[in-house]
Amino acid sequence: MARVLLFGPLRDLAGWREREVAATSLAELRSLLAAEDADLGAALGGKGVQIAVDQAIVRGDAPLTTRSEVAFLPPMSGG
C-alpha cells in the first residue's frame, strides 16, 4: 500500500495527515480519495497543489508500488 501524506489545509480538510492506500497509480489513488471525500478530491485537484512521489514532484499520472510515498503539497504563499 502506498503511504499518503497531506500537508497544511489539505490535512485540515481531510482530518488526517497520513494513511495507507492500496493503489497502483497516482490516478487510481486520487480517484479513491475523491470517492471517499468529494471535498478532498476537489482540493487535491486544485490550482497550485503539487504532488511528490518518493520525494520527486510529478505531473500527470505515475505508477505506485507498495513502498511508494505520495505527498500532496498545498500551494505555497509568501514573499
Image (cartoon, grey):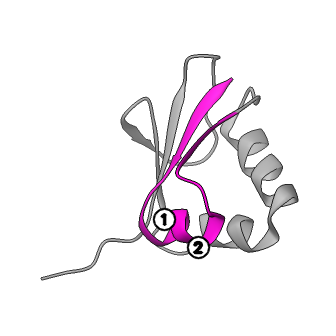
Residue 42 picture quarter: bottom right
Amino acid at dot 1: Val
Q: Which sits in the foreground, 28 or 9?
A: 9
Amino acid at dot 2: Gly
Farthest-out residue, left = 79
- State whether residue 71 is above or below residue 75: above
CB-based contact (under 8 Å), mark 2 and mark 1: yes
Farthest-out residue, front = 15
Name the residue rendered at 52%, 51% in the picture. 17
- The CA span between labels 2 and 1 is 6 Å
Name the residue rendered at 36%, 34% in the picture. 55
Please give the residue where the numbered disc 1 appears in the rendered image: 49
- State whether residue 24 is above or below residue 49: above
- Decide if residue 63 is in sight here: no
| Element at label 2 | loop
Q: Residues within 10 Å of mark 1 (few under 14, many from 20)?
A: some
Give the magenta range: 1-20
